[in-house]
Amino acid sequence: MREPQEIIQAPLVTEKGSLLGEKTNQVLFRVKRDANKIEVKQAVETLFKVKVTKVRLTRYLGKIKRVGRSAGRLPMWKKAYVTLKEGDKIDFFGGA
């Protein structure tokens, strides 16, 4: 069993994430590439003390970046859409 801090890398604060939070009570997280839904659910529940009803995961390929003649690839990553129970809320900005 991995630690919750290892599974969840960072919250994703974007315009799309803000709209999802307002309309459907969902929160976006960047998670480790090898994490599964069960691990993400347990990590969010232990870190933020909320009840999770649903988790969806999406994989993203790394973009190809060029510098001069050489090209490289950014690493692949995974995004988690976490749906919270009605009434639960995660506030990343501390009420700001």
Image (tube, rainbow, N blue to C red):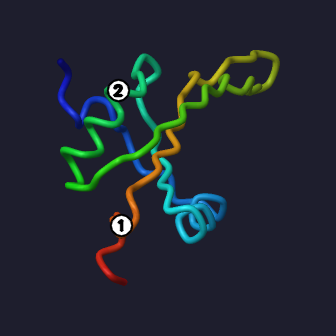
According to the image, label 2 marks what residue? 38
According to the image, label 1 marks what residue? 89
The residue nearer to you, when weighing 33 against 87, is 87
> Which quadrant does the N terminus fall into?
top left
Residue at image position (57%, 62%) is 24
Residue at image position (41%, 26%) is 32
| x, y percent for residue 5 | 23, 37
Secondary structure state at the residue bearing disc 1: loop
Residue at image position (40%, 22%) is 35
Q: In screen coordinates, is 45 left or right of 77?
A: left
Image quadrant in which you'd find residue 94: bottom left
Secondary structure state at the residue bearing disc 2: helix
> Which quadrant does the C terminus fall into?
bottom left
90 lies above or below 93: above
Residue at image position (53%, 64%) is 21
Name the N-terminal-most of marks 2 and 1.
2
